[in-house]
Amino acid sequence: MKVYKIIEGKDHALKIREEIRNRIGGMAGAAGRPPKLEVIIAGSDPASLYYASLIKKAGAKEGIEAVLNHMKSPDEYKVLEKIENLNRDETVDGILIQLPLPPPLNKEKIINAINPLKDIDGQHPVNLGKLISGQKGIFPATARAVLKIIKLNGIEVSGKRTVVVGRSTAVGLPAAIMLVRENAAVSVCHSKTAPLEEFTSEAEILVVSAGKPKLISENHVKKGACVIDVGTNEVEGEMVGDVDFERIIRKASVSPVRGGVGALTMACILENTFNAYKKNIHGNGTQ
Ligand code: NAP
């Protein structure tokens, strides 16, 4: 039985990270400091804490200082005060808020408080507005990772019938906008799209970011399509994607849960931080 291509992210991510490491090596001496990313974890969501620890580790490997701010009790005033202090601190290049935020924290209020120049996941309305209007800005790391995995694997985007499942401001919508900019013909599906397979089975490129384990099976997929699985769901201690990889690989090319989009998302977080650092040390990093 024919098995299609695995759409690879890890090796490409390692190359991007190596380049960042080399470039920081050449700049940090003159700047007097390495790039600094402040990660805020409000509450004690285990997945957020774990992911923040991975960012710290990845940053340390590539020469970026990632500081974890674990604010156990979700006090909105304290989170906003923390952000304000980090905005003012010239030695801080980037701020990353781990989502989802626990109640009663107001996501919009907290995201809007970040200096857009330090908004490492591109969630501030200024950066999202720049993405839509085609201006330069900081754009969501996972959406960037989706575009990178497609392009770095040599998948042609222009003119392709493309379906994005998911419309979050962190992944689905920005990925759809980026794909439109690359001249794809994009449809966006969500939880109210029924039947989902009527849309997905037409897609030459299918991006799935729904947060629903194995939502997409072989009958959702067009033969020979390219399927990008963004989903990371913990099921009985195992990491499961939104796509049923084992079944779909016999019908289409697929990105794996491990070594796929996630590896490139981390590379994009580091890249976004490095770019914010470059701007900051050249004197245009304040609000
Ligand atoms: P989210 O904010 O919960 O958004 C999920 C989206 O999927 C929503 O737009 C929702 O529709 C849609 N959806 C939910 N169930 C659906 C269904 N049955 N059919 C069609 N659409 C459905 O999640 P997110 O932040 O975008 O993250 C999605 C997944 O990606 C999660 O598993 C997350 O862990 C993972 N993730 C991975 C990475 C990585 O680097 N690999 C990074 C970030 C996130 P409505 O809008 O109608 O509710």
Image (cartoon, helix red, strand yellow):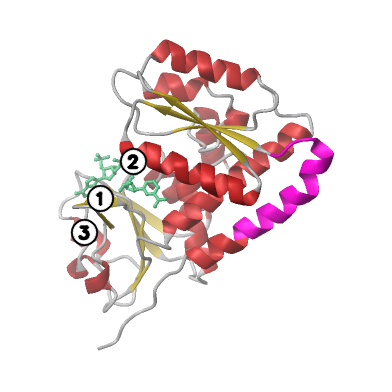
Image x and y of residue 23, in percent: 74, 52
Q: What residue is disc 2 on?
A: 47
Q: Is residue 115 above or below residue 140?
A: above
| Residue 166 in view | yes
Q: Residue at x 65, y 18 (%)?
A: 88
Q: Is residue 35 above or below residue 221?
A: above
Kind of element beneath mark 3? loop
Q: Which residue is mark 1?
A: 234
Residue 26: in magenta span:
yes
- Give left or right: position of 206 versus 278: left
- The residue located at (35%, 18%) in the rendering is 73
First in sequence: mark 3 or mark 1? 3
Tag in front: 3 or 2: 2
Farthest residue to the right: give it: 30
Give the position of the N terminus as an image quadrant. bottom left
Mark 2: give few (<14), some (14-19) or many (20+) Cα within 10 Å: few
Q: Does label 2 point to a residue whose CB lies under 8 Å from ligand 1?
A: yes
Task: State yes or no: discs 1 and 2 in contact (Cβ < 8 Å).
Answer: yes
On the image, the x and y values in percent for residue 183 come to 50, 59
Q: Which amino acid is tagged 3?
A: Lys
Question: What segment is highlighted magenta in the picture?
Answer: 16-34
Amino acid type of the residue tagged 1 in the rendering:
Glu
Q: Which residue is mark 3?
A: 214
What element does badge 2 sit on?
helix
91 to the left or right of 39: right
The tag earlier along the polypeptide, 1 or 2, is 2
Cα gap from disc 1 to disc 2, whole angstroms: 9 Å
Question: Can you say whether 118 is above or below 187 in the image?
Answer: above
